[in-house]
Image (cartoon, grey):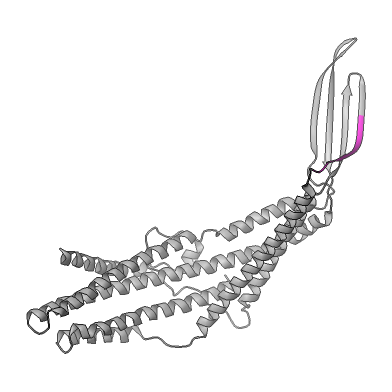
Amino acid sequence: MQRFRAVVCVLSCLWSTVLGAARVSAQLDFGEVLSKRRPSADEVEVERLLAEAQRISAGSRSFAAEGPTTSIAGGPRDGRDGSEGDLSLQIEMPLQAARGERRALGEMLPAAAAAARMFARATADAELAEAFVAAWLADAVARVRAQDLAAVEAWLEASRRRMEAGADAPYEPTLVGGERDRALVEWIEARREAELAWGELRARAEVPPRPEPVALDALPGYATIPDGTASSPGDVMRAGIEVRRNLAIAVARAQTALAGSRWGLAGEVAVEGDERLAHVGVAYRLPLRGERTAIAAEQTAAETAANRDAERRRVEVEAQVAAAAATLGWAGQVLETSALDAAQAALAARLEEGKQRPSEILPLRRQLLEARIAALRSRAARVAAEAKLFFLAGEK
């Protein structure tokens, strides 16, 4: 029964490999995935901040803090000649205090909106590229694990035949069987990682629900930017972070100015029986107990939060740029796939010809397996670093 399950697993691995090879022509490229990217949480937050700034700065050149409040009242009046009607119209216009804060916000908003959106878009594109490469790597590792499991299953059969022929000790198939079980667990874990990586990609873009092969060839790279046109990723992102910080602080200060506006113009026109009247005056809103202190504390907290957020983003971007540069600064070469395939075939031949026992070949096969996975990770790291620097430089 255990052997049957192992064969089923191997067939499943081989079937997955065959399906993957059949879908090579339909691989997803990054351009297609990028065109279907979902808005990131940071982009949504930027749009919320811009909408709030637009609302607060509306009418920033006028003296009005808000739109006028109108009210109409009417009712009967009993007089000596019978019942008559009264009608009154009241208008109150709150006046804006500290107009400069609101005007400054309105003047900086167009340029700040473009820079804030650029920063959020660049960050989202870089994260999408990272998720795309992670999905490719997870799928590629799973395929290597599947091929390794199939190879170990074949070695197990060869070891059993040699034991039955008296060429090897009885413990040799047991050693290979244990390695087969280990390869099976590693393949299951690799498929799990592939599903999780695809889920991360689906969270950022509208891709098919089930994992599909992806191609790294169309992924943009920082090295592809023509000389003389590339911007420093750190400088571009720092500028975007600073603009976003200034915008958040300007919004907080404008809100404080509005909250501190207390004076207003008030007017009334009324008809009371045969009389006509009109009043013009001023209005003053009395502050609640502790309101002024709370408004000041709210502004201080908002500015502190904006500064802390900007510093955190700056540190993160600088670390990402430094990590990507360190990755690309390594100029070492990895083994070619053809060399690894030749070594794998040579090990299998030595086992079949009886030149080495399975227990002697298993450690060598493990080294080749790790070399394959290391080559995949090396390529993924370099491609991801190139794409990250490309997008963090403000390219698109």
Answer left or right for 321 relative to 169. Answer: right
Task: Give coordinates of residue 29: x percent, y percent.
Answer: 44, 69
Is residue 138 shown above or below 247? below
Q: Nearer the viewer, residue 116 or 320?
A: 320
Q: Does the magenta stretch include residue 334?
A: no
Is residue 53 shown above or below 228? above
Q: Residue at x 75, y 50 (%)?
A: 294
Is residue 315 shown above or below 302? below
In the picture as drawn, the residue positioned furthest to the left comes out as 165
Task: Give coordinates of residue 332: x percent, y percent.
Answer: 45, 88
Answer left or right for 99 relative to 34. Answer: right
Answer left or right for 152 relative to 260. Answer: left
Task: Give coordinates of residue 165: x percent, y percent.
Answer: 7, 81
Query: What stretch of residues is rendered in magenta?
Result: 278-287
Q: Residue at x 55, y 58 (%)?
A: 39
In which image quadrant can residue 278 be found? top right
Q: Which residue is drawn at 65% across and 73% down?
A: 236
